[in-house]
Image (cartoon, rainbow, N blue to C red):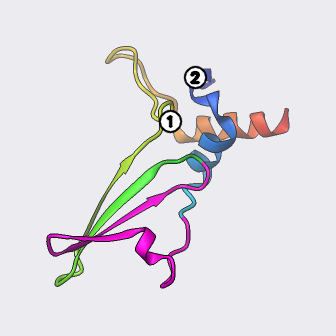
């Protein structure tokens, strides 16, 4: 059984852990709210509509190469108490989320 601490926001975190994040759609009208040009790259900042995880992607304007990183909300990431402690697998977390939904 997974630790209960990650279930503090089970609807948001469980859905994203099970089915991946849901990013807002980008369109030409709304792009100015998400895209900023910095030093030869377009920086796109998107916030998951369920859990508030932020994805920041940099796309080089000349080569198209992209790199991304994420900023997670408090409580989203699972942390080990020590090096020997094992974190629950994605499958275990999905089962916990399904159990939450069925209660």
Splitting the image into 4 quarters, where does residue 83 fall?
top left
Residues drawn in magenta: 24-50
Side (left or right) of 30 relative to 1: left
Residue at mark 1 to residue at mark 2: CA–CA distance: 9 Å
Q: In which quarter of the image is the N terminus?
A: top right
Where is residue 61 drawn, in percent x and y? 21, 81
Where is residue 68 drawn, in percent x and y? 31, 60
Q: In which quarter of the image is the C terminus?
A: top right
Which numbered tag is attached to residue 76? Answer: 1
Q: Residue at x 45, y 61 (%)?
A: 46
Q: Which of marks 1 and 2 is nearer the N terminus?
A: 2
Side (left or right) of 52 relative to 61: right
Which numbered tag is attached to residue 62? Answer: none
Secondary element at tag 1: loop
Where is residue 2 drawn, in percent x and y? 59, 25
Q: Does the magenta stretch include residue 92?
A: no
Which numbered tag is attached to residue 5? Answer: 2
When the figure is inspected, residue 84 is found, relative to residue 91, above or below; the finding is above
Q: Which residue is drawn at 45% across and 34% down?
A: 77
When the figure is inspected, residue 68 is found, relative to residue 64, above or below; the finding is above
Of residue 11 and residue 4, the one placed in the foreground of this image is 11
Side (left or right) of 91 relative to 77: right
């Amino acid at each position: 059984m997974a630790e209960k601490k990650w279930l503090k926001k089970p609807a948001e975190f469980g859905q994203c852990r099970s089915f991946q994040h849901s990013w807002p759609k980008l369109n030409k009208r709304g792009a100015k709210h998400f895209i900023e040009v910095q030093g030869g790259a377009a920086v796109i900042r998107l916030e998951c509509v369920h859990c508030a995880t932020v994805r920041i992607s940099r796309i080089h304007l000349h080569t198209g190469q992209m790199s991304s990183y994420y900023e997670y909300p408090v409580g989203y990431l699972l942390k080990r108490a020590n090096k020997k402690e094992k974190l629950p697998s994605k499958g275990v977390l999905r089962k916990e989320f399904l159990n939450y939904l069925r209660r």
